[in-house]
Image (tube, rainbow, N blue to C red):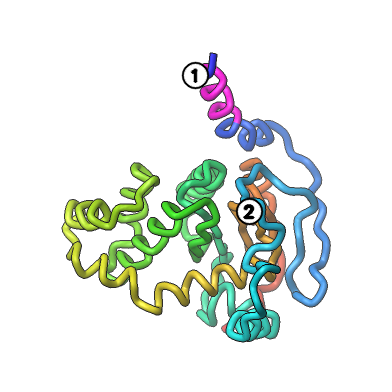
Amino acid sequence: MLTGGAAAVAAWIYAAPRLGSLWRRELVYHDLDGLAPFRELAGTGARSSTNNVIVGFDVAKAPDPAKAARIAAIRADPCAALFGLAKDLRVPVAFFSDFNCPNCRVLETILADYQKANPGVLRLVRFELPLLGAASTTASKAVLAADRQGAYAAMHDRLLRNRMVSDLNLVKAMAEDLGLDGPQLVADMQRPEIDTALDQARALAAVFGFYGTPGMVIGRTVFLGAIPAADVAQIIADERALPPLPCLQA
């Protein structure tokens, strides 16, 4: 019975966002106060979260000036913080995910299917947001370190097949299986730049209200959780009908 129940839950996680693809619904957007021109999609999708109410803040700890400064900088220019200043008129997509979040895999598949059917429309920016334990943090650091060797995608795919990784010797072996410099990758996981990237993702999540994963910003539209493929396609269509974001205009 337990096995059957687990299979049913897994099937629902996979199928629920796709069921909504059978019909189109009217999407409702609300402006985000203090974050113009960004807006929020009404409602949330299927998500995974911890017990934290707001990502990046812990009332038991003393105020962190560095964190406060990071959040202030994001609020001053949220567009650049999310997407950079690249002069690229494709629809930008910021994707916040955790390797151990099953709903992230659902939304990632929906996004990949859209990109395959509509090449050249989207520009994807990934943010590692490990909320689900030590293994998630290790995987996030490993994929960011692999990016330093030009192997983000390969390591990302490899980690999805073995997400519960906390042993650095296993990380090293996985990297070497991909033809990477394993010892260098493990050493790079400890670099301050890796922690800075994770801190920046946490700060962005706090500003945009991503208290769980997946979180996504498509153009100026913010939403939390895996939503139906039809909704994703409609958001993209709505964004394409709007002027480009100011930080991305040529």
Describe residue 157's horizontal placement relative to residue 76 as left or right.
left
| SS majority, magenta | helix
Describe residue 38's horizontal placement relative to residue 200 as left or right.
right
Q: Is residue 99 above or below residue 90?
A: above
Mark 1, residue position: 3
| Residue at image point 48% right, 60% down | 120
Does the image show residue 6? yes
Q: Camera-side residue: 202 or 125? A: 202
> Residue 165 got which mark?
none
Q: Camera-side residue: 38 or 174? A: 174
| Residue at image point 39% right, 46% down | 163
Secondary structure beneath label 1: helix
| Residue at image point 61% right, 58% down | 216
The image quarter containing residue 79 is bottom right
* In magenta stretch: residue 111: no
Question: The disc labelled 2 sits on which kind of residue?
Answer: Gly
**Picture mark count:** 2
Mark 2, residue position: 212
Using the numbered discs, state the Cα–Cα distance from disc 1 to disc 2 in whole angstroms. 26 Å
Q: Is residue 70 above or below residue 123?
A: below
Q: Position of residue 134 (x, y in %)?
A: 44, 55
Q: Position of residue 49 (x, y in %)?
A: 62, 49
The image quarter containing residue 73 is bottom right
Question: The disc labelled 1 sits on which kind of residue?
Answer: Thr
Q: Which residues are magenta?
A: 3-12
